[in-house]
Image (spheres, rainbow, N blue to C red):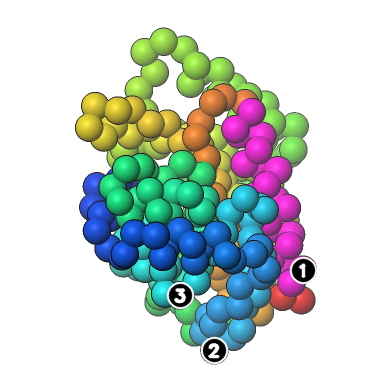
Amino acid sequence: MRARVQMCLVVALGLTGLFASQCIAQEAESKSTAPTEVRVGLKSIVLPAPSSELLEPGPDYRVILEPLAPISNRLVAGYILPDELHAIETGKSTLTRYALVEVPRRAEFADVDDTIFHQVADMAAKQFNVTLTNSLNDMQSEINMKLKSLDKDGTQITLDKPTPLGLFFNKPDAVALGMVLKSNHGGESKTEAGVTLFMHLKNRILIAYLFTPYDGETSVNWLRTTGEHWADAILKANR
């Protein structure tokens, strides 16, 4: 998780002058929210967009987002606001709302059954200090408590210590864990809320990330709702 947080700022630090100016924005804006088909461990996986505002730029321009994936994962899809794609290329902006879909390199070709998937999800949940047996009421109470603590004066969220919000939802083939992280670049502070989705489909494991600017309960509720709809859509598209 520490590596994930650190990689979130690479776009802000170094993705300038990568491509010709206007062709990137025009290419992204011309794309629809039609599902993206990718290959994962010899399997064809269909990936609907997480929301209508986020577009997958396609393989030619997806390289802009590749630095956000740690070496241990392979980026298979990325989603970004169309106007921010051009702004990042010209060095005028950082990412605000975006999503990534990755596959663990070492497990990409491994057949993963239900038991192994839940072992992996449980290990990830322990990093957030939660268990997958928490009731929905317990989850909501924990998230609300942590949101209140974040709004107190003097709360510090550093790059290497994101604040976990706990379990957003737990389904047979999808588990979601939330967090809030803060960064500072060039004297400008930025706080993001994010959800990590572990999904099990076609005997493969996918890890998806969705980030949005943090503004308290509103942003966290958006993440939880959008993340759940996105996971459901991905699972349905690949049944």
Q: Inspect the image, locate mark 2, and give the three-letter code of the amino acid beneath it.
A: Leu
Residue 90 visible at all: yes
Disc with the residue nearer the chain's start (3 vs 2): 2
Q: Is residue 154 above or below residue 157?
A: above
Residue behind mark 1: 236
Please tell me which residue lies in front, 160 or 215.
215
Asked if the magenta segment contains residue 221, the reply would be yes
Residue 208 visible at all: no
Q: Is residue 54 above or below residue 191?
A: below
Q: Inspect the image, locate mark 3, and give the three-letter code of the amino acid beneath it.
A: Pro
Alpha-carbon span between mark 3 and mark 1: 24 Å
Residue behind mark 2: 42
Asked if the magenta segment contains residue 223, the reply would be yes
Based on the displayed image, in which of its 4 quarters is residue 215 positioned? top right
Q: Is residue 46 above or below residue 29?
A: below
Q: Position of residue 140 (x, y in %)?
A: 69, 31
